Image: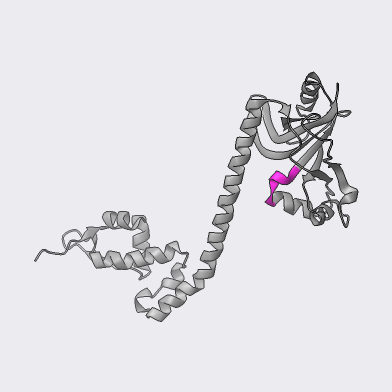
Amino acid sequence: MAEPRLYDIKDAARYLEVAPSTLRYWESQGLVRARRNRGNDYRQYSLHDLIEASEIAFYRKLGVPVRELEGYRALSARGLDEALARTEDDVERRIAQLEATRARLSRQRALNAEAARLARQGMRPDAPGIARLDAIDYDEAGPWRLLVEEPWRYGVLVDAAHPNEIREAVADASPSEAGAATGTCGGAAGALWRRSPGHTARTCLECLLKVAPALSESNARELFDKARGQGVEPVLIVGSYLLTATDDAGRWDFHRAWVVGESAA
C-alpha cells in the first residue's frame, strides 16, 4: 500500500488559493493543523488536513470572522451551522449589492456606447428622447439622492439666447421626484421644459453636448451654429448625462442632447 502523500505549505496554499502566511495564521488560531517534517521541521499537510483547511477557507470566503471559528475543532455540527447562519443574511445582502453593481455596470457601458455613437454620427434629425426637465432646488436633499443613485437622470438645458449659461435639471422625474427636486408638491412649478407634439425630427436635432464639469464652458454655441446650417433655428438644447471623460480638449461631461428649435424654412 502506497504511503499517503504529504504536501508542503506552498502546495497546500496553492490548492486552497490562500497565502502561506494565511495558513500559518490559521494554525496559530487553532483552525488548521500541520505535521512537521522530522528532517527539517517544515510544515506538511495530509489530504485530510487539506480537506479540513478547505472548510475554513470556505467559511472565510463567506465572511465568517476568524474569532467565530476559533475552537473550530471543538464545534458540533449545530455549532458550525449557527456560525453559518449568522453570516447568511450578510451573504444575501452582498449578493444583492453585487447584482445592483452588475446592473449599474451594464447600464454605464450602454451609456458609454451611446456617447461613442453620437460622436461618430454627428448631428442628425431626431425627436427628443427625454420628456421633461425639472429645475433643482439645491437646498432639498431629494435630487442629490436621486442623481447619485441614477446619474443618467442628471439633465441640462442651454438657452440659445444665452449659450454660455448651463442650467442643471432632473430629467424625466415622476411627479413625486419632481416635487422633491423643486421643493413643490407636484413639480409643475419647477418644470424647465416639456416635450410637446411639435418637437419632432423636423425641428429637433440629436447631438453630443460637452459641458465642463464646473459648467464654465461647453460646445453649445457650436451646436447651435450647426443646427442653423441644417435649417433649424435653435431655441435651446436639452440633454441627459452619459459620462464624464477626457478628450483632446479637456475633461467633459458628455450628454445625449437635442437642439430644439423651429424650422427655418
Q: Is residue 7 above or below residue 107?
A: below
Horizontal and vertical percent for residue 151? 69, 46
Taking depth in this image into account, of 90 and 128 the one nearest to the observer is: 128
- With respect to residue 9, does 254 lie above or below? above
Q: Give the magenta range.
A: 149-154
Tell me what residue is drawn at x 44 percent, y 68 percent: 66
Q: Residue at x 41, y 73 (%)?
A: 70
Q: Position of residue 194 (x, y in %)?
A: 84, 42
- Which residue occupies the extreme right position in the image? 189
- Residue at 38 percent across and 74 percent down: it is 72
Q: Quadrant of the N terminus?
A: bottom left
Given residues 149 and 113, the one toward you in this image is: 113
Q: Vertical placement of 184 versus 89: above or below?
A: above
Instruction: Characterize the magenta stretch by its predominant secondary structure.
Output: helix
Residue placed at 73% from the left, 49% from the top?
Answer: 147
Residue 209 included in the magenta stretch of the image: no
> Within the image, what quadrant is residue 256 found in?
top right
Is 26 left, or right, of 115 in this rendering? left
Give the farthest residue toward the left: 1
Judged left or right of residue 203, residue 100 is left
Question: What quarter of the picture does the C terminus occupy?
Answer: top right
Q: Is residue 37 left or right of residue 216?
A: left
Any magenta on residue 150? yes
From the viewer's side, name the closer residue of 31 and 182.
182
